Each structure stands twice: as C-alpha cells, then as structure tokens.
Image (cartoon, rainbow, N blue to C red):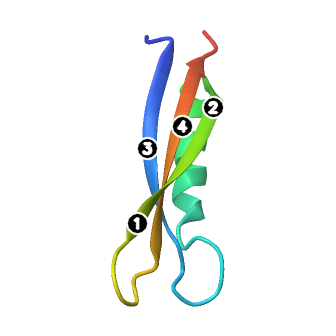
C-alpha cells in the first residue's frame, strides 16, 4: 500500500450565483479515500480557467492523502 495518494477533482463554478455545482464529488472522493485507510493531508486549489459563455469557471482541487496503516 502506498504511503501517499494524490488525486485531483475539478470543481465547476456556477455561472449565476456563487458556489460549486459539484461539491458532492469532492466530498465523495475524500470519503472513499478515508474508507480505504487514508486521511486528507493537504488540499490546494488553482483556477483552471473558464469553459466559455454560460459555463462558469473551473477550479482544480489537488488532494494529498496519507496512509494511516
């Protein structure tokens, strides 16, 4: 089993209003890794640019998980 796992989740920002449209995907990714015996060590985000008109921005979340075993 690896000591660390690095995953990336792309969050889609709403065009109208505030907030991400798919925070549940981020939450599910974290919960799946925790169930495998990892804990979230670090998370960082970067702006991934815009999809275009009506698409909203993209934010890339990079997650580093550390093994507890």
- For the point 46% across and 72% down, the residue is 57
- Badge 2 density bin: few <14, some 14–19, many ≥20, Cα 10 Å: few
SS for tag 2? strand
Give coordinates of residue 21: x percent, y percent.
Answer: 54, 73
Answer whether labels 2 and 4 touch (C-beta < 8 Å): yes
Measure the C-alpha gap from mark 1 to mark 2.
22 Å
Query: What distance separates the C-alpha of mark 1 from that of mark 3?
Result: 15 Å
Q: CA distance from mark 4 to mark 1?
A: 19 Å
Counting residues from the start of the chain, the first of labels 4 and 3 encountered is 3
Q: Are marks 2 and 3 in contact (CB under 8 Å)?
A: no
Q: Is residue 34 above or below residue 2?
A: below
Query: In the picture shown, does residue 29 fall above or below 53?
Result: above
The residue where tag 4 is placed is: 63
Report how far apart the C-alphas of labels 2 and 4 lie in the structure: 6 Å
**1 or 2: mark nearer the eye:** 1
Tell me which numbered mark, 2 or 3, is placed earlier along the sequence. 3
Tell me which residue sits at (50%, 18%) in the image. 4
- Graded by Cα atoms within 10 Å as few (under 14), some (14 to 19) or many (20 or more), the crowding at tag 4 reads some
Asked which secondary structure carries label 4, the reply is strand
Residue at left offset 40%, top offset 90%: 54
Q: Judge from the rendering whether residue 20 lies leftward or rightward of residue 54; answer left or right.
A: right
Quadrant for residue 24, please give it.
Answer: bottom right
Disc 1 packing (10 Å; few <14; some 14–19; many ≥20): few
Q: Position of residue 2 (x, y in %)?
A: 44, 12
Assign the N terminus to one quadrant of the image: top left
Residue 58: x and y, percent?
A: 45, 66
Using the image, tell me which numbered label, if any, was put on residue 58.
none
- Using the image, tell me which numbered label, if any, was put on residue 42: 2
Q: How many angstroms separate mark 2 from mark 3 (CA)?
A: 12 Å
Residue at which label 1 appears:
49
Hey, which quadrant is residue 37 in on the image?
top right
> Looking at the image, do the residues carrying marks 4 and 3 touch, with CB atoms under 8 Å apart?
yes
């Amino acid at each position: 089993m690896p000591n660390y796992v690095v995953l990336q989740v792309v969050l889609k920002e709403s065009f109208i209003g505030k907030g991400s449209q798919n925070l549940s995907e981020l939450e599910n990714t974290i919960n799946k890794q925790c169930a495998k015996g990892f804990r979230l060590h670090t998370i960082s985000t970067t702006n991934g640019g815009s999809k275009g008109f009506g698409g909203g921005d993209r934010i890339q979340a990079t997650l580093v998980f550390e093994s507890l075993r």
